Image: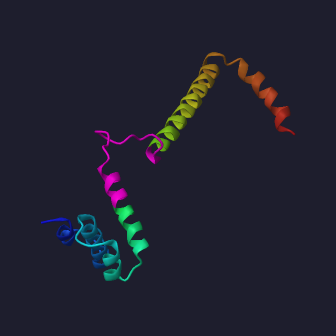
Amino acid sequence: MNGPELVEGAEGSPEAKKRLQGILEALEGRKTLLDVATELGMREAMIHRLKTRVIQAALESLEPKPLGRPSMEGSAERKRIEELEKENEDLKEKLQASELREVIVRDVPELIPRLEKKKKPHDAR
């Protein structure tokens, strides 16, 4: 089985399959681009552009790719992880501040009346 016959088993619309079969026949030398264009009711220049796109798409799909899992760099998941890490750091700081307030209230109770006096004039504004 050669290229044009392999197209039959591929997924795609009948029109796309006919175009690809024509382009493959032209690449094999069985037909000219003008013949393919005439059969498909298209201009030769359009068939030439399609042929170029087919070749480019095939080359891109055959490029070697790194092994393993794709990098998360720049992905939505990476962004979300960064947001969660920042939130985690903020919460740790708030927890430390809360624990410090608790220690002050428990271990230095004489500061509380002075702190409350400072709050009252400020609250009266």
Q: State the image coordinates of residue 43 (x, y, percent, origin top left).
A: 42, 78
Count every numbered label the image shows and give the total: 0
Residue at the outermost left position? 1
Indicate yes or no whether the magenta region holds residue 73.
Answer: yes
Residue 123, by quadrant, is: top right
- Report the residue at 46% width, 40% height from top: 81
- Looking at the image, residue 59 sits to the left or right of residue 120; the answer is left
Percent x, y of residue 99: 57, 25
Position of the N terminus, as image quadrant, is bottom left
Q: Residue 112 is drawn in which quadrant?
A: top right
Seen at 31% across and 82% down, the residue is 39
Measuring 33% from the left and 72% from the top, which residue is drawn there?
33
Q: Is residue 42 above or below residue 121?
A: below
Q: Residue at x 42, y 72 (%)?
A: 46
Question: In which image quadrant can residue 48 be found?
Answer: bottom left
Q: Is residue 106 left or right of residue 21?
A: right
Indicate the position of residue 16 as horizontal and vertical percent values. 31, 74
Left or right: residue 91 versus residue 64 is right
In this picture, is 87 found above or below 105?
Answer: below
Question: Is 72 included in the stretch rendered in magenta?
Answer: yes
* Residue 74 vs residue 63, the one in the foreground: 63
What are the residue bounds of the magenta stretch? 55-77
Residue 85: percent from the left, percent from the top? 50, 35
The colour scheme used here is rainbow
The C terminus lies in which quarter of the figure? Answer: top right
